[in-house]
Image: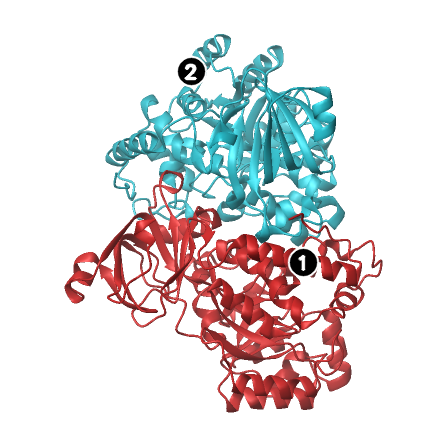
Chain colours: A red, B cyan
Amino acid sequence: MKQLSPIGPEGAIFHDLLIIPGHSEKPLLDGAIYIKGSDIIDVGTLAEVESRNPSSPKVSMKGYLACPGLVNAHTHASMSFFRDLGHDRVLPTTPGNSMIEDFFFPSEKELTADLIEPLAYSYLVDGLKSGVTFFGDAYFFARGTCQAIDRLGVRGAVAEHHADLGGPLPAGRELWKKTKAWIEDWDFPTITPVVYAHAADTVSREFMNELNDFAVQNQLPFHMHLSQTSGERDRVLTRERMSPVAFAKECGVLRPKTLLVHLLSADEQDIKLLADSGATAGLCPVSEILYEHAPLGRQFVEAGIPIALGTDCAASNDGSDILNEAKVFGLMLRMQGLDHSKSSPHFLLDTITKNGAEALGSPWVGAIKPNKKADIVFMKTGLGVEPQSDPMVNFFYTMGAKQVRHVMVDGQWVLVDGELAKVSEADLRDQFIQALKEIKSRTNLPMTVPTA
Amino acid sequence: MKQLSPIGPEGAIFHDLLIIPGHSEKPLLDGAIYIKGSDIIDVGTLAEVESRNPSSPKVSMKGYLACPGLVNAHTHASMSFFRDLGHDRVLPTTPGNSMIEDFFFPSEKELTADLIEPLAYSYLVDGLKSGVTFFGDAYFFARGTCQAIDRLGVRGAVAEHHADLGGPLPAGRELWKKTKAWIEDWDFPTITPVVYAHAADTVSREFMNELNDFAVQNQLPFHMHLSQTSGERDRVLTRERMSPVAFAKECGVLRPKTLLVHLLSADEQDIKLLADSGATAGLCPVSEILYEHAPLGRQFVEAGIPIALGTDCAASNDGSDILNEAKVFGLMLRMQGLDHSKSSPHFLLDTITKNGAEALGSPWVGAIKPNKKADIVFMKTGLGVEPQSDPMVNFFYTMGAKQVRHVMVDGQWVLVDGELAKVSEADLRDQFIQALKEIKSRTNLPMTVPTA
């Protein structure tokens, strides 16, 4: 399509757009965005943008809405091989009742570095087609995840999994040495390196301090599961004589630029600690409802704790459509009795743009504003979603992933007409299928390997 | 596209399909469907179907899933002019607190028959693009809704709105005479006529009996709002000295082939009455959560009451994506503590296929089985949703409206590659915009009329 040819060195003004800018700014009903290189240079009416940037090429996007590339703040993309299998925590091959210990761990023991990149493709592609341009991912052999993100042309904040007190694979101090060296030679320009501790019960106090100190010294974001289950809470209470959240506070983790995920077993005292800290709560409502119980959304909102949403992983959600996650979160907050004004569409948009971007040390994404990176989702509007009398309400309660048509990241097209623009989906799928075959033969999971 | 040319008189076998048959039947991983005229003739493996129907043309649908056309059991399609405006029940023009009396009624007073067909297009198109082929609609001037359904080539069970004790427009006995005459000369072959009473507080005992008697005598489905709000409950308690559900029972309405919608103010005794009756509960979870409170889903499931889902209307949902409605319903049931096994994907599928079709007197739709009508949704599978180790789980928790590509109704294509096949969307939109302009000038709603 001519109108979606690459942007030349002189940049381009995309106009005739309904723009959802983010950062609680009002939608622009007939807006224009000037993009040059990898950046958003200017936003306004066409007359304004043209007068400030004369003789730039113009591209009409009539019939489209533009929103910031969406941030999926907590994912484990390569766990796509568990897709469909985690529901009800019962597997033919693992009759026990612990999803993590009887199901995830034995399978994950079989992972090797070479499988991570292809195993991530499925989850990332589903996310991208749903408007996600930024993945806050953490998993084993994270270089593979970075390679997958890079290959699709999207963006992220990626962390190597660390845990010195258990887990399926060695992920303690030996690995951490290598991770530090990798971070020092970081070679993924559109991916932010992140320090990640798996959880309060799988990471010792000493290791947690070491990880956190490195993050503070190097101004890196810190990402972890915290108070994920009542089991974790019990284990940390026994080991540390305090709650997981209190333990995290003692380790210095409760501070801005940390993303603390799930918090399902947090109590009132924990919520007070969180509220005073500037840390962001990472919630994965669908995963949590299916796997454990609904997140403490109302309590966190009322305590003023910033919230970033994630879709977690294919074992427990199972897709990576973060826009629908936000709709579900909004409905859940209403069910929990939160005052309606506190779950406004602007609030919901922050949970899938700004809040995750900031917590994950990447404030250059998450809004359509000058000086932000040109990560933009173009969604088809038209008859089925009209009238758009309140475009913010419309965005969450009428529109959805089915409207996502074109996506730009870093000023380059990564999805055009719903199809991947930078890489052949057929090639990715072939490699994904090969990796599934391999993991199936190693794990004996009751997995259906697709036919090529 | 050649493969989606019209089916000839000899019929066609669509094969290489992952088939979700409905009626709790197991998915067919590599299935074939033989369609002839408007009917599904045969379903099985390609070898089976070919051997039973030799020399029929074959069409490979590799990479697609086929599911039954989805049933959206409770809609008011023409209310699309309220889209985005019903949230929080607050409108600049109507500072009161009753959405129905201060907002809907004054606007609906301005409706005329000519506006209903074009006003329905938006909602029906959004539904069709989300896989809905059957709309259980009830509204004023319902012939217009039938014309809109007919024009798109979809199907439904449509009712004229009746209420003799209030409401924005006269809808009592005078109208009912005309409705009866219309039903006797019914001229929409793919639409089932339905008898509809607006609600227990807006319909007198005498009128309710009259409506219900006609439905029973003519074996027509009966559709109504019941126990929609605490206000309705209070008014009926005052007027009839019994609950709305008990009143409906006395009028003979609690029986198979009735669809009783919302039931938000039903109590335990009411639920017992419903459970013994064979009537179907029509629930609209998103609309109910946003407008009132979550439906009594767990109680109805535990009482064994059949449930059919609807999306209600654009004032309170706001889209018509019934597949996502079912996902939200499944999550809501988990939040309400329902035993996991009772909200299985097979259960959820029944709520958006079989249960609505049966309650609305149209058991010829809602499954991919021999002798059902050929109403089929073809959804694109592939990398983003794989592996599909449990296709039923995958259907609800990974797939979504964004996968809907082609839709067939009555053996004819109505959506191809995501675009309307029987009618120009641009023409529909022009007429929709004209109708919006007209309703805006009459009502002074704070509505944004799209530009052509």
Where residue A226 sits in the image (x, y, percent)? 64, 75
Mark 1, chain letter?
A: A
Furthest residue toward right: A95
Where residue B76 sits in the image (x, y, percent)? 46, 32
Q: Nearer the viewer, residue A398 or B304?
A: A398
In the rendered view, would you say B161 is above or below B102?
above
Task: Please identify, in this view, whether the residue under mark 1 or under mark 2 is nearer the observer.
Answer: 1
Residue that numbered label 2 is attached to = B175
Q: Which mark is residue A256?
A: none
Q: Nearer the viewer, residue B9 or B162?
A: B9
Where residue A90 sits in the image (x, y, percent)? 79, 55
Name which quarter of the figure residue B374 lies in. top right
Residue that numbered label 1 is attached to = A434
Res A5 seen here:
yes
Where residue A98 sits in the image (x, y, percent)? 79, 64
Disc 1 crowd, CA 10 A, few/some/many (<14, 14-19, 20+): some
